[in-house]
């Protein structure tokens, strides 16, 4: 989830609980957020073979964007989110995976949350 949360300081986390939240102050053009994840077995999204992207506005969820699940259980993946002129480019192991429509202005985006059937090894705002 990319959304407007509370706060806005740099943060790096390791072996985070799930869901993992990382502050991303002023997520404007060219800024990046990176997460190293290890998918785990048994969850709903894996059985649906789906990755879901969404945003909250004023505490309410907007519409979901869904794409096919590229992950396999117990493998290590690096996800990178890069702000790019109205889009959030999502890279998987350095290769473009998905373009997520930036639904809020960059000044309103200040938190990234990773939730679901994954172990978050590390996450950082670059």
Image (cartoon, rainbow, N blue to C red):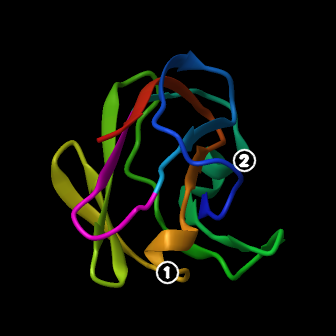
State the extent of the magenta-drawn residues as a range.
26-35
x and y, in percent, of residue 48 in the image: 63, 57
Q: Which mark is residue 105?
A: 1
Label located before the other in sequence (2 or 1):
2
Residue ranking furthest to the left: 94
x and y, in percent, of residue 92 in the image: 27, 49
Label 2 environment density (alpha carbons within 10 Å; few <14, some 14–19, many ≥20): few
Position of the N terminus, as image quadrant, is: bottom right
- Residue for point 48% across, 53% down: 25
Magenta: main secondary structure equals: loop
- Residue for point 43% across, 61% down: 26
Label 2: state its secondary structure: helix
Looking at the image, residue 92 sits to the left or right of residue 13; the answer is: left
Camera-side residue: 61 or 124? 124
x and y, in percent, of residue 86 in the image: 35, 84
Q: Which mark is residue 30?
A: none
Label 1: state its secondary structure: loop
Residue 4, compared with residue 78, is above or below; it is below
Q: Which mark is residue 44?
A: 2
x and y, in percent, of residue 95 in the image: 16, 54
Residue ranking furthest to the top: 15
Looking at the image, residue 65 sits to the left or right of residue 34; the answer is: right
Camera-side residue: 103 or 48? 103
Image-quadrant location for residue 108: bottom right
Distance from label 2 to label 1 (Cα)?
Answer: 31 Å
- Residue for point 57% across, 27% down: 40
Looking at the image, residue 11 sits to the left or right of residue 97; the answer is: right
Residue 34 included in the magenta stretch of the image: yes
């Amino acid at each position: 989830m990319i959304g407007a949360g509370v706060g806005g300081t740099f943060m790096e986390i390791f072996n985070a609980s799930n869901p993992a939240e990382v502050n991303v102050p002023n997520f404007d053009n060219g800024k990046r957020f990176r997460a190293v994840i290890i998918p785990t077995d048994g969850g709903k999204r894996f059985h649906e073979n789906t990755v879901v992207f969404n945003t909250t506005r004023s505490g309410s969820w907007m519409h979901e964007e869904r794409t096919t699940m590229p992950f396999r259980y117990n493998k290590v993946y690096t996800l990178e989110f890069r702000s790019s002129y109205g889009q959030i480019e999502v890279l998987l192991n350095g290769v473009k995976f998905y373009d997520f429509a930036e639904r809020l202005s960059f000044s309103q985006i200040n938190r990234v949350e990773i939730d679901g059937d994954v172990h978050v090894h590390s996450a950082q705002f670059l």
